[in-house]
Amino acid sequence: MSISHVSSLIKPAKNIAVLGAGAWGTALAIHLSKAGHAVTLWTHCAEQARVMTVHHENARYLSGVTFPTTLSISDSLEALIPHVDAVLVVVPSSAFKQILQKISAQLSARCLHVAWATKGFDPSSQCLLHEIAFDVLDERVGLTVLSGPTFADEVARGLPTAMVSASEKENEAQYWADLFHFDAFRMYTQTDMIGVEIGGAYKNIIAIATGLSDGLRLGANARAALISRGMAEMMRFGQALGARPETLMGLAGLGDLVLTCTDDLSRNRRFGKCLAESGQTA
């Protein structure tokens, strides 16, 4: 028996709700289920919930990856949220505030842990997502952001992955790290929520630029210049908002930037390439 399997057996299993059944939410739900937790993946679409329940996979976003037997599906927040120990939000940033507002009144005394793996800014206020969460949720709820260089397909298939769990409260960051630690998955902890969120959002801009560059066949020199100068710009932007430089030089900044800019599994990189190849880049 492997060490990782032994550790998963001795840590208490949790009842976790993962909100958002896209590729990323599904991948994280699969991993948490494999780690021994009772996980329910929520989708806002009743038909999608029915299809995933019947076929035991998310064919639309992660075709060919079978769900663990401990992974359940739901389309009802009202029936789900009052009975879980922790909530992981993995919806688009445009829906982030709305989801938090919906679950805020349903969080029970047993569920004081909310995290999100959503990347981006709130499109209405341009605030970072932790600012939205602190404003919407009760102050008793521990808040954590999860980010890092990851592709959903690789996480779902159990390939080696490292992420960052960041919270103003060290015990909250560790809570989520403990939930995720399993097999080839490692979660590192820190307290710089601003830096982690900026790294996860800003790298998308640079990824589109590198996709454009590669789509126009401008060469490896141009790609390297975009990544390195983009990193410098991210550092200046992050420090202006209060991020720590070492955060942006780590997994959530540099790591995510390199991954997103250099592999065609990145949607932002592919978007940039498509723009260039279509000629619609004016």
Image (cartoon, rainbow, N blue to C red):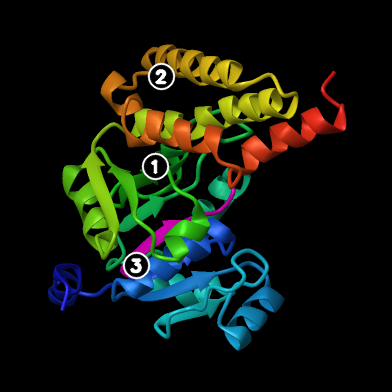
Residue located beneath label 3 in the image = 108
- The part of the chain drawn in magenta is 84-92
Cα distance, mark 2 to mark 3?
35 Å
The picture quadrant where one finds residue 218 is top right
Magenta stretch holds residue 85: yes
How far across and down, in percent of the image, does residue 75 sit?
59, 74
Residue located beneath label 2 in the image = 238
Residue closer to the observer: 127 or 43: 43
Q: Is residue 38 above or below residue 197?
A: below
Residue located at (44% from left, 67% from top)? 29
Secondary structure state at the residue bearing disc 3? loop
Residue located at (67% from left, 27% from top)? 214
User: Which numbered disc flags the more N-terminal residue, 2 or 1?
Assistant: 1
Quadrant for the N terminus, please: bottom left
Secondary structure state at the residue bearing disc 2? helix
The amino acid on which the numbered mark 2 sits, given as a three-letter code, is Gly
User: Which numbered disc flags the more N-terminal residue, 2 or 3?
Assistant: 3
Disc 2, disc 1: CB below 8 Å? no
Disc 2, disc 3: CB below 8 Å? no
Cα distance, mark 1 to mark 3?
29 Å
**Is 190 left, or right, of 28 in this rendering?**
left
